[in-house]
């Protein structure tokens, strides 16, 4: 009986060892498949890191372009301000202030009745070339008022 008990005990131990070995093999396979999954994710992470670096390079390049364009806009705005100041100075030099006020009143009168001017223009164009309008020669004061409107912006 002792031998039979020993045989049973050895069989049980053998079965336990086989179950343990099977469990270890299963866990080893799981570890191997998880390792492959991790390797795949590492590859994906590497690709994403490259894409991030490329995106950062594009952002840096665009920021450089934006800064350059902002500098150009600033320079152009300064040049525009200088040009408008120069135009205003030239207009003030060309017209004395008293004449300027009279011309502004004439322009206001002509701006109030644009339909009559259009009718006259149509009649004149049917009969030949119209004579130059003396008010058009003094349109610089209108430019000056539009220049001062730009300064409000």
Image (cartoon, rainbow, N blue to C red):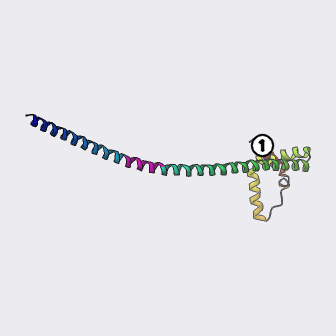
Q: Nearer the viewer, residue 13 or 119?
A: 13
- Front residue of 135/6: it is 6
Residue carrying label 1: 151
Mark 1 surroundings within 10 Å by alpha-carbon count, few (fewer than 14), some (14 through 19), many (20 or more): few
Residue at image location 49% in from the left, 49% down from the top: 48
Q: Is residue 109 left or right of residue 69?
A: right
Picture layout, residue 128 above or below residue 66: below
Residue at image point 20% right, 39% down: 16
Q: Is 29 covered by the magenta stretch?
A: no
- Horizontal and vertical percent for residue 54? 56, 52
Which image quadrant for residue 102?
top right
Q: What predominant SS class does the magenta segment belong to?
A: helix
Q: Is residue 58 left or right of residue 87?
A: left
Q: Is 5 on the left-hand or right-hand side of 151?
A: left
Could you say which is closer to the camera, residue 81 or residue 47?
47
Magenta residues, start to end: 35-45
- For the C terminus, the quadrant is top right
As drawn, which residue projects farthest toward the front? 2
Q: Nearer the viewer, residue 54 or 119?
A: 54
92 with respect to 123 (left or right): right
Quadrant location, the N terminus: top left
């Amino acid at each position: 009986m002792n031998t039979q008990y020993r045989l049973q005990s050895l069989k049980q131990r053998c079965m336990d060892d086989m179950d343990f070995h099977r469990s270890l093999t299963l866990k080893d396979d799981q570890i191997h498949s998880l390792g492959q999954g991790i390797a795949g994710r590492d590859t994906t992470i590497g690709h994403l890191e490259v894409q991030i670096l490329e995106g950062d390079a594009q952002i840096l390049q665009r920021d450089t372009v934006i800064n350059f364009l902002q500098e150009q806009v600033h320079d152009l705005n300064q040049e525009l301000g200088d040009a408008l100041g120069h135009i205003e100075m030239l207009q003030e030099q060309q017209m004395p202030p008293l004449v300027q006020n009279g011309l502004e009143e004439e322009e206001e009168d002509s701006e109030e009745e644009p339909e009559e001017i259009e009718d006259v223009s149509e009649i004149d164009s049917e009969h030949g070339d119209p004579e130059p309008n003396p008010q058009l020669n003094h349109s610089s004061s209108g430019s000056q008022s539009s220049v001062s409107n730009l300064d409000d912006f």
